Image (cartoon, helix red, strand yellow):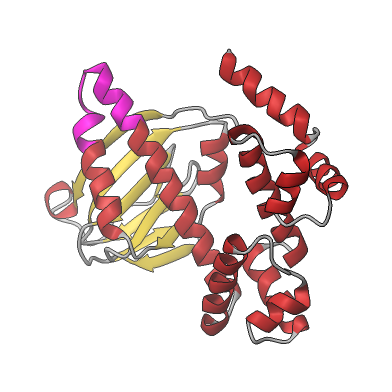
Protein backbone atom coordinates (compact mmCIF):
# COMPACT_ATOMS: atom_id res chain seq x y z
CA UNK A 1 0.00 0.00 0.00
CA UNK A 2 1.52 3.32 -1.14
CA UNK A 3 0.36 6.02 1.32
CA UNK A 4 1.39 9.44 -0.01
CA UNK A 5 0.16 12.33 2.11
CA UNK A 6 -1.51 15.22 0.29
CA UNK A 7 -0.57 18.86 0.16
CA UNK A 8 -3.31 20.60 2.14
CA UNK A 9 -3.91 23.84 0.28
CA UNK A 10 -6.76 25.22 2.38
CA UNK A 11 -9.36 24.23 4.95
CA UNK A 12 -12.13 26.35 6.40
CA UNK A 13 -15.77 27.42 6.16
CA UNK A 14 -17.32 28.75 2.96
CA UNK A 15 -20.45 30.92 3.20
CA UNK A 16 -21.89 32.16 -0.09
CA UNK A 17 -23.87 34.90 1.67
CA UNK A 18 -20.54 36.49 2.54
CA UNK A 19 -18.42 35.40 -0.44
CA UNK A 20 -20.84 36.18 -3.31
CA UNK A 21 -23.63 38.39 -1.99
CA UNK A 22 -24.93 39.53 -5.36
CA UNK A 23 -25.26 36.15 -7.14
CA UNK A 24 -27.83 33.40 -7.24
CA UNK A 25 -25.50 30.96 -8.99
CA UNK A 26 -21.72 30.71 -9.28
CA UNK A 27 -19.81 30.67 -12.57
CA UNK A 28 -18.56 27.43 -14.11
CA UNK A 29 -15.01 26.62 -13.06
CA UNK A 30 -12.66 23.65 -13.31
CA UNK A 31 -11.50 22.00 -10.08
CA UNK A 32 -7.71 21.78 -10.08
CA UNK A 33 -7.44 19.61 -6.96
CA UNK A 34 -9.63 17.50 -4.69
CA UNK A 35 -12.31 19.72 -3.16
CA UNK A 36 -14.15 17.94 -0.33
CA UNK A 37 -17.07 19.65 1.38
CA UNK A 38 -19.78 18.87 3.92
CA UNK A 39 -22.73 21.29 3.93
CA UNK A 40 -23.52 22.92 7.25
CA UNK A 41 -27.16 23.64 6.38
CA UNK A 42 -29.76 23.19 3.63
CA UNK A 43 -28.89 25.12 0.50
CA UNK A 44 -29.31 25.29 -3.25
CA UNK A 45 -28.01 22.77 -5.79
CA UNK A 46 -24.45 21.57 -6.46
CA UNK A 47 -23.59 20.77 -10.09
CA UNK A 48 -20.40 18.78 -10.73
CA UNK A 49 -19.57 17.25 -14.12
CA UNK A 50 -22.87 15.73 -15.31
CA UNK A 51 -24.31 15.24 -11.81
CA UNK A 52 -26.41 17.47 -9.58
CA UNK A 53 -27.61 17.21 -6.00
CA UNK A 54 -29.64 19.28 -3.56
CA UNK A 55 -27.31 20.63 -0.89
CA UNK A 56 -28.03 19.22 2.57
CA UNK A 57 -26.02 18.22 5.66
CA UNK A 58 -26.51 14.50 4.96
CA UNK A 59 -24.21 14.45 1.92
CA UNK A 60 -20.48 14.89 1.40
CA UNK A 61 -19.32 16.50 -1.84
CA UNK A 62 -16.07 15.42 -3.49
CA UNK A 63 -15.08 17.28 -6.65
CA UNK A 64 -12.09 15.76 -8.43
CA UNK A 65 -9.33 17.49 -10.43
CA UNK A 66 -10.53 18.38 -13.92
CA UNK A 67 -14.26 18.35 -13.13
CA UNK A 68 -16.37 21.36 -14.08
CA UNK A 69 -18.58 22.64 -11.28
CA UNK A 70 -20.92 25.43 -10.28
CA UNK A 71 -23.47 25.94 -7.52
CA UNK A 72 -26.96 27.33 -7.21
CA UNK A 73 -26.81 29.31 -3.98
CA UNK A 74 -27.07 29.53 -1.02
CA UNK A 75 -24.23 27.26 0.06
CA UNK A 76 -22.52 27.06 3.44
CA UNK A 77 -20.04 24.29 4.12
CA UNK A 78 -16.84 23.09 5.70
CA UNK A 79 -14.21 22.41 3.03
CA UNK A 80 -10.72 21.10 2.44
CA UNK A 81 -8.74 21.49 -0.79
CA UNK A 82 -5.91 19.00 -1.32
CA UNK A 83 -3.38 18.19 -4.02
CA UNK A 84 -2.73 14.49 -4.62
CA UNK A 85 -1.38 13.02 -7.85
CA UNK A 86 -0.67 9.38 -7.02
CA UNK A 87 -0.81 6.73 -4.31
CA UNK A 88 -3.50 4.85 -2.40
CA UNK A 89 -5.29 7.96 -1.11
CA UNK A 90 -5.47 9.34 -4.64
CA UNK A 91 -6.92 6.06 -5.94
CA UNK A 92 -9.60 6.00 -3.22
CA UNK A 93 -10.66 9.62 -3.74
CA UNK A 94 -10.65 9.28 -7.53
CA UNK A 95 -13.03 6.30 -7.35
CA UNK A 96 -15.62 7.56 -4.86
CA UNK A 97 -18.87 9.19 -6.09
CA UNK A 98 -19.12 12.95 -6.37
CA UNK A 99 -22.04 13.02 -3.92
CA UNK A 100 -21.88 10.61 -0.99
CA UNK A 101 -24.83 10.01 1.30
CA UNK A 102 -23.97 9.72 4.99
CA UNK A 103 -25.65 9.15 8.32
CA UNK A 104 -22.60 10.38 10.22
CA UNK A 105 -22.60 14.10 9.49
CA UNK A 106 -21.53 14.83 13.08
CA UNK A 107 -18.38 12.72 12.63
CA UNK A 108 -17.48 14.53 9.42
CA UNK A 109 -18.08 17.94 11.01
CA UNK A 110 -15.77 17.02 13.88
CA UNK A 111 -13.04 16.06 11.39
CA UNK A 112 -13.48 19.29 9.44
CA UNK A 113 -13.44 21.38 12.62
CA UNK A 114 -10.13 19.73 13.49
CA UNK A 115 -8.77 20.36 9.99
CA UNK A 116 -9.71 24.05 10.22
CA UNK A 117 -7.84 24.27 13.52
CA UNK A 118 -4.73 22.19 12.83
CA UNK A 119 -4.03 22.64 9.11
CA UNK A 120 -3.69 26.41 9.48
CA UNK A 121 -1.20 26.17 12.35
CA UNK A 122 2.56 26.70 11.75
CA UNK A 123 3.42 24.06 14.37
CA UNK A 124 4.76 20.73 13.09
CA UNK A 125 2.72 18.77 15.65
CA UNK A 126 -0.47 20.38 14.32
CA UNK A 127 0.47 19.40 10.77
CA UNK A 128 0.82 15.80 11.94
CA UNK A 129 -2.63 16.02 13.53
CA UNK A 130 -4.06 17.48 10.31
CA UNK A 131 -2.69 14.57 8.27
CA UNK A 132 -4.18 12.07 10.73
CA UNK A 133 -7.56 13.78 10.24
CA UNK A 134 -7.16 13.56 6.45
CA UNK A 135 -6.61 9.80 6.76
CA UNK A 136 -9.70 9.51 8.96
CA UNK A 137 -11.69 11.54 6.43
CA UNK A 138 -10.64 9.34 3.50
CA UNK A 139 -11.44 6.22 5.55
CA UNK A 140 -15.01 7.44 6.22
CA UNK A 141 -15.50 8.53 2.61
CA UNK A 142 -14.41 5.13 1.33
CA UNK A 143 -16.69 3.35 3.81
CA UNK A 144 -19.75 5.49 3.05
CA UNK A 145 -19.20 5.39 -0.71
CA UNK A 146 -19.07 1.59 -0.68
CA UNK A 147 -22.32 1.45 1.28
CA UNK A 148 -23.89 3.79 -1.25
CA UNK A 149 -22.74 1.67 -4.18
CA UNK A 150 -24.15 -1.44 -2.46
CA UNK A 151 -27.50 0.27 -1.92
CA UNK A 152 -27.67 1.50 -5.49
CA UNK A 153 -26.99 -2.02 -6.75
CA UNK A 154 -29.70 -3.62 -4.64
CA UNK A 155 -33.31 -3.18 -3.70
CA UNK A 156 -33.51 -1.66 -0.22
CA UNK A 157 -34.76 -4.86 1.44
CA UNK A 158 -31.97 -6.95 -0.07
CA UNK A 159 -29.36 -4.39 1.04
CA UNK A 160 -30.21 -5.00 4.73
CA UNK A 161 -30.09 -8.76 4.14
CA UNK A 162 -26.60 -8.62 2.58
CA UNK A 163 -25.35 -6.35 5.38
CA UNK A 164 -26.56 -8.93 7.91
CA UNK A 165 -24.98 -11.78 5.92
CA UNK A 166 -21.60 -10.00 5.81
CA UNK A 167 -21.70 -9.60 9.59
CA UNK A 168 -22.67 -13.27 9.95
CA UNK A 169 -19.79 -14.41 7.73
CA UNK A 170 -17.19 -12.41 9.68
CA UNK A 171 -18.44 -13.82 12.99
CA UNK A 172 -18.73 -17.43 11.78
CA UNK A 173 -15.70 -18.16 9.61
CA UNK A 174 -15.43 -21.75 10.93
CA UNK A 175 -19.07 -22.54 10.04
CA UNK A 176 -20.48 -23.97 6.82
CA UNK A 177 -20.44 -20.94 4.53
CA UNK A 178 -21.36 -22.68 1.31
CA UNK A 179 -23.75 -20.93 -1.07
CA UNK A 180 -26.68 -23.14 -0.05
CA UNK A 181 -26.00 -22.69 3.67
CA UNK A 182 -25.65 -18.91 3.56
CA UNK A 183 -28.58 -18.47 1.16
CA UNK A 184 -30.65 -20.50 3.61
CA UNK A 185 -29.52 -18.24 6.45
CA UNK A 186 -30.63 -15.24 4.36
CA UNK A 187 -33.96 -16.95 3.49
CA UNK A 188 -33.30 -16.52 -0.22
CA UNK A 189 -32.94 -18.97 -3.07
CA UNK A 190 -29.33 -19.80 -3.97
CA UNK A 191 -29.54 -18.11 -7.38
CA UNK A 192 -31.21 -14.95 -6.06
CA UNK A 193 -28.78 -14.72 -3.15
CA UNK A 194 -25.77 -15.19 -5.46
CA UNK A 195 -26.98 -12.34 -7.70
CA UNK A 196 -27.66 -10.02 -4.74
CA UNK A 197 -24.34 -10.76 -3.07
CA UNK A 198 -22.34 -10.26 -6.27
CA UNK A 199 -24.15 -6.96 -6.94
CA UNK A 200 -23.41 -5.75 -3.41
CA UNK A 201 -19.79 -6.79 -3.01
CA UNK A 202 -18.48 -7.29 -6.54
CA UNK A 203 -17.39 -10.79 -5.47
CA UNK A 204 -18.92 -14.24 -5.39
CA UNK A 205 -19.69 -15.66 -1.95
CA UNK A 206 -16.76 -18.09 -2.24
CA UNK A 207 -14.34 -15.28 -3.13
CA UNK A 208 -15.54 -13.12 -0.26
CA UNK A 209 -15.46 -15.89 2.36
CA UNK A 210 -11.96 -16.97 1.33
CA UNK A 211 -10.78 -13.36 1.43
CA UNK A 212 -12.08 -12.96 4.99
CA UNK A 213 -10.51 -16.26 6.10
CA UNK A 214 -7.13 -15.26 4.66
CA UNK A 215 -7.36 -11.85 6.30
CA UNK A 216 -7.96 -13.49 9.69
CA UNK A 217 -5.17 -16.01 9.06
CA UNK A 218 -2.71 -13.22 8.22
CA UNK A 219 -3.42 -11.67 11.59
CA UNK A 220 -3.01 -14.94 13.47
CA UNK A 221 0.29 -15.69 11.71
CA UNK A 222 1.97 -12.63 13.22
CA UNK A 223 0.14 -12.34 16.54
CA UNK A 224 0.02 -15.94 17.85
CA UNK A 225 2.16 -19.07 18.17
CA UNK A 226 -0.47 -21.28 16.54
CA UNK A 227 0.69 -23.88 14.05
CA UNK A 228 -0.43 -23.71 10.43
CA UNK A 229 -2.83 -26.58 11.09
CA UNK A 230 -4.36 -24.73 14.04
CA UNK A 231 -4.64 -21.50 12.06
CA UNK A 232 -6.30 -23.26 9.15
CA UNK A 233 -8.86 -24.72 11.58
CA UNK A 234 -9.42 -21.36 13.34
CA UNK A 235 -10.12 -19.70 10.00
CA UNK A 236 -12.45 -22.34 8.59
CA UNK A 237 -10.23 -23.90 5.91
CA UNK A 238 -10.88 -27.56 5.11
CA UNK A 239 -7.21 -28.51 5.52
CA UNK A 240 -3.77 -27.04 6.09
CA UNK A 241 -2.73 -27.85 2.53
CA UNK A 242 -5.70 -25.95 1.06
CA UNK A 243 -5.07 -23.06 3.47
CA UNK A 244 -1.44 -22.81 2.29
CA UNK A 245 -2.53 -23.04 -1.35
CA UNK A 246 -5.24 -20.37 -1.00
CA UNK A 247 -3.00 -18.08 1.04
CA UNK A 248 -0.17 -18.20 -1.52
CA UNK A 249 -2.58 -17.64 -4.40
CA UNK A 250 -3.95 -14.51 -2.70
CA UNK A 251 -0.84 -13.12 -0.98
CA UNK A 252 1.81 -14.25 -3.53
CA UNK A 253 3.82 -15.93 -0.74
CA UNK A 254 3.40 -18.87 1.62
CA UNK A 255 2.08 -18.31 5.17
CA UNK A 256 5.57 -18.83 6.64
CA UNK A 257 7.12 -16.43 4.12
CA UNK A 258 4.46 -13.84 4.98
CA UNK A 259 5.16 -14.12 8.72
CA UNK A 260 8.93 -13.79 8.15
CA UNK A 261 8.41 -10.75 5.94
CA UNK A 262 6.25 -9.00 8.55
CA UNK A 263 8.72 -9.78 11.35
CA UNK A 264 11.61 -8.53 9.20
CA UNK A 265 9.81 -5.26 8.55
CA UNK A 266 8.98 -4.89 12.24
CA UNK A 267 12.59 -5.53 13.28
CA UNK A 268 13.82 -2.95 10.79
Q: Within the image, what quadrant is residue 187 found in?
A: bottom right
Above-or-below relation of 88 to 38: above
Above-or-below relation of 100 to 223: below
Q: Within the image, what quadrant is residue 159 found in?
A: bottom right
Residue 120, magenta (yes or no): yes
Q: Nearer the viewer, residue 100 or 166?
A: 166
Q: What quarter of the picture does the N terminus occupy?
A: top right
Residue 128, magenta (yes or no): yes
Q: Nearer the viewer, residue 89 or 247?
A: 247
Can you give x and y, in whole percent of width and height, for residue 80 in the image? Answer: 32, 40
Can you give x and y, in whole percent of width and height, for residue 179 in the image? Answer: 76, 74
The answer to whether 127 appears left or right of 162 in the picture is: left
Q: Nearer the viewer, residue 60 or 31?
A: 60
Can you give x and y, in whole percent of width and height, for residue 210 in the image? Answer: 74, 55
Can you give x and y, in whole percent of width and height, for residue 97 in the image? Answer: 50, 57
Above-or-below relation of 239 to 186: above
Residue name at image x 43 percent, y 41 percent: 34
The rendered magenta stretch, by its main secondary structure, is classed as: helix
Residue name at image x 77 percent, y 71 percent: 178
Task: Say whether residue 27 is visible.
Answer: yes
Residue name at image x 48 percent, y 32 percent: 84
Extent of the magenta region: 116-131
The answer to whether 200 appears left or right of 72 in the picture is: right
Q: What quarter of the picture does the C terminus occupy?
A: top right
Q: Within the image, what quadrant is residue 10 found in?
A: top left
Residue name at image x 53 percent, y 38 percent: 90
Task: Say whether residue 98 is visible.
Answer: no
- Report the label total: 0
Amino acid sequence: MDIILPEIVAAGIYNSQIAVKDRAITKNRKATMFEIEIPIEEGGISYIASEERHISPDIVICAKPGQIRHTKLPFKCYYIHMILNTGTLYDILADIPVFIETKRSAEYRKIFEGLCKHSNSPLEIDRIKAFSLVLELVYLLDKDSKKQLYRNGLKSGNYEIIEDVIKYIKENLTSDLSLNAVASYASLSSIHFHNCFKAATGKTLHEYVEEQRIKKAAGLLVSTDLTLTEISYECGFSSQSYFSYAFKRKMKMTPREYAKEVYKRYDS
